[in-house]
Amino acid sequence: MARKAGEADLWARIEPLFARIERPVRYIGGEWGAVSPDAAPAAPSAVAAPSVSTAPSAAAAASAAADSPPYRVVLIYPDTYELGQANQAIGILYGLLNALDNVIAERCFLPAAAMADAMRAEGIPLFSLESCTPVSEFDLVGITLPYEMTYTNVLEVLDLAGIALRAADREKDAPLVVGGGPGAFNPEPIAPFFDAVLVGEGEDAAAEIVEAHRQAASVGCSRPESLALLAKEVSGLYVPTLYEPQISPQGRFAGMRAVSPAATDVHKRTPVDLSAHPAPVCPVVPYMDVVHDRVNIEILRGCSRGCRFCQAGMVYRPVRERSADEVVASAIKGLRHTGYDEVSLTSLSSADYSMLGEVLRRLKSRLVGTGVSISLPSLRADALSIGMAGLLGGGKKAGLTFAPEAGTQRLRDVINKNVTEKDLLETVQAACLAGWQRVKLYFMIGLPTETDEDLGAIGRLVGRVLAEARSAVDPKQRSGVRVAVSISTFVPKPHTPFQWESQISIEETRHRQSVVREHMPRKGIELSWHDAETSFLEGMIARGGREVAEVIEAAWLCGARFDAWSEQFSFDRWAKAIAEAGVDAAGILSRERDSEEPLPWDHILTGVSKRYLVAERERAFSGEVTEDCSFLGCTGCGVCDGSSDCSGASPHVGLSTDPGADFNSGPDAGDRSGTGIVIATGRAVR
Amino acid sequence: MSTGEFRLRICYEKSGRLRWLSHLETVRAVERIIRRAGLRFALTKGFNPHIKVAFGPALPVGTASLCEYMDVWTTRYDEAGLVLALLQAVSPMGLCPVAAVYIPEREPALTVALTIGLYRVEVLPVGAGGRVEVGAGAAPVEVGVLEAALDELMAFGELTVERRGKKKTYDLSRSIAGDVRITGDGGDGGDGGGDGGKIVVEIPIRMGPEGALRPEVMIGRVLENVGVGAGAEVGTGAGSGATSGSKALCALNVTRTGLFVETDEGTWQRPM
């Protein structure tokens, strides 16, 4: 079948750019598992031009709804292919939308800087991978919000696509621009750029958005009418133009005002039954070497460990599991359809999956002699985890990652990181006896109540881990033992018990880094820091209100993009943007909020009650830990209220897949909070 | 060879958008095709076992091919035609096996055996806006002019190429393995470019352990010598014979059309 003339034309203009740029494989599409461009009929958009009719393609004619043009969606990850293609949410939504009648979903990623520049120079607009269609010609443009430092990339995406940056400036025929993902839990800093933002998990809502948007188009709604209809019809869909932030005379946020009857509190979406949404049978299999390039089976969604700094642990409740049968069947099917040689069992905390042992044993026996390996990316620092890792068998031991987060037990109690030093040392010992030689430890600085004693204790703990590891390995291999230490700055996140706390300044971050360094062993470790200036910007955006959008736009205008790539990041651009926008960025970080005061994300409801967050904050300051409700009874967070499941110990209900829980986002695996330990176990299960 | 292993030689093509895959990307993609096809492949020995497979000489990014070769060792003998059909069913467009045959284990490795690559370089006219415009008029250069410039370069005898800051000089009498054919409009023998405005150059290149001269670099240099910049290559990766700065008048589209074993008698044989 011939492609639409205009699309073929665009490809003929794109291909000659490849001689000038790196990694053209990012832009060619055509992967196994991708929808064929021939299946994307040469038809006008369903919404933008409903009056134009063209001859439908043979494939479309066979479908029941061939009389109307297909609804076209493009799913965009605001970073390059090799990062975005790994995003499980895009994979899930891609499969789910393409399965809908008369809906076509394609993908698009932000071109690398050199390609974007070449496209601008040649007047080539941002295009979809499958059919080379300009992004501006789609009905719906879905953009993932993986984390704060990708927000200038969102503007780069819109600009390259030729779509007005601000929703208010978009014409009637412009695509509906919808955001979603972890960033949706405080949508205010990007609110002006989106027509709508979906809060929570997208499985059920995606089809509802398509349906409501089609419906609005069919009755000829104006753009504001369409948006009001979408807000009304789709629970969890936040339409920013229906709300107006109120600012007090002191310049503080004073609550949201509804400017339309359609503006209500936004309740996050949570599909209760994950088995209704099985893992994609044949996800797209990239040609490019991408991160997490393997079959990913989500075994568990949500985490009830209750770490007080962790947003994912609060907003993706309740915990939901997939059955062992489903996990095993999906893994085998996925491997067969993709040809991958690795399957990963993903979640926020895989050791909490109640049937992990059974699943590993069954998979291992099914995969004998195939050279396929199984990996478990998120385990906890306990002996059970090492036992599970041992089940994966021999092979290369890539490295073990643990996240004690703080150096002293006192501070770990404050943040409710229920891992003791004894757990950690025993786990390291077990791992090293089992053959691992590389250990990575994650810590945070700037945590509430932190003192120099806590900072110094980080280095001492690292020293004990190093000693434990050295004593456990074969003496001949002792010199090969390495402990990598990664230290990030605590950024208080909305919807957590620490959402009211102050964040340390850039200067204080550097000071505390120097205190940590003083007490760190000199040999056998590799120390890395999260950049203090980046943490500052993350903090500003994480808890910022709608005024922060001015800063993001000004920064992008100053040339900021790919801010998560250290070689492309420049704090000067942002400093200039903050000054231009007149926003008190330092104030957003440093001010300790009163628990009674309105917060810019108060209209976004995650199900965890504010009362619970306040109580958890108080328990933090009195050093009281809160147990995991999965094992030791309800802690009253509010998520399960009204459901019959919460009477007993386990909130684990049936599981589905999570577009929101993008816990592997960003080049630095952005928000890894909540991850107890990460075991990239080795290879072959033979 | 281990007992019970069978060496299957597969010829596959690489075309369309997938010409932009690097060698490593191609290897990975083909391994996944083998797994999807459910072949009973042999595994390599060692700590990190993977599919036992060997590829022929790497194809530059951007160059298409009608005939790439790989050997895969299987643990079960299935009729070659059946295996081919299984592979084709799970191959993406543009990376598709076209022939399969069992070969004796004693045959030398593909990378050693294949020393001659035959290339077809299409010289395409470029219109306004950098678009390739075949069929829109005259060729960027006349066949006779190109032939004369090529003869001149061959008589000079060597070509120095700079790639990533390193200079390398090729002895053309060795690198060019036979006659270079230049035809107008897709090989119909017409002079002066024909209606399509396309010139086709067929060029055999001798490959060796020290690497091989890239055909588009050679043709790019010849074009440059007659004042035609090839700036907007369609089928060539960075580092080809593009003249920077000058306005591109043509684009080059490169396809490997044959890979051969050079016998002691100097004849060329296909590897299967």
Image: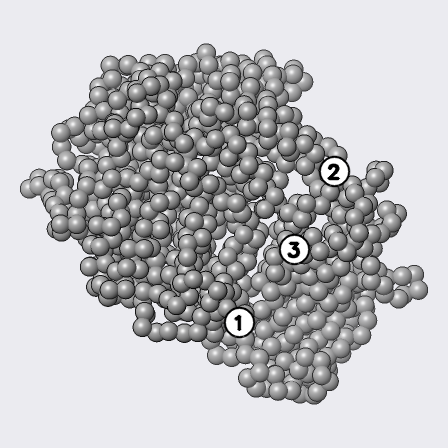
Q: Secondary structure at mark 2?
A: loop
Q: Amino acid at mark 2?
A: Thr
Q: Amino acid at mark 3?
A: Ala
Residue A291 visible (yes or no): yes
Q: Residues within 10 Å of mark 2 (few under 14, many from 20)?
A: some
Query: Pointer 1 and pointer 2: residues touching (CB < 8 Å)?
Result: no
Q: Quadrant of the N terminus of chain A?
A: bottom right
Query: Pointer 3 and pointer 2: residues touching (CB < 8 Å)?
Result: no
Q: Secondary structure at mark 3?
A: helix
Discs 3 and 1 share one subunit: no
For residue B21, above or below residue A125: above
The location of residue B131, given as percent across then percent down, is 51, 75
Q: Secondary structure at mark 1?
A: loop
Q: Which mark is residue B89?
A: 3
Q: Quadrant of the C terminus of chain A?
A: top right
Viewer-nearest of discs 3 and 1: 3
For residue A349, above or below residue B154: above
Q: Is residue B28 left or right of residue A591?
A: right
Q: Amino acid at mark 1?
A: Ala
Q: CA distance from mark 3 to mark 1?
A: 22 Å
The location of residue A496, given as percent across then percent down, is 27, 29
> In the rendered image, which residue does mark 1 sit on?
A2
> In the rendered image, which residue does mark 2 sit on?
B44
Which chain's residue wears label 1? A
Name the residue rendered at 54%, 47% in the picture: A282
Q: Residues within 10 Å of mark 3 (few under 14, many from 20)?
A: some
The location of residue A471, given as percent across then percent down, is 58, 13
Q: CA distance from mark 1 to mark 2?
A: 43 Å
For this rendering, which residue is in front, A57 or A258? A57
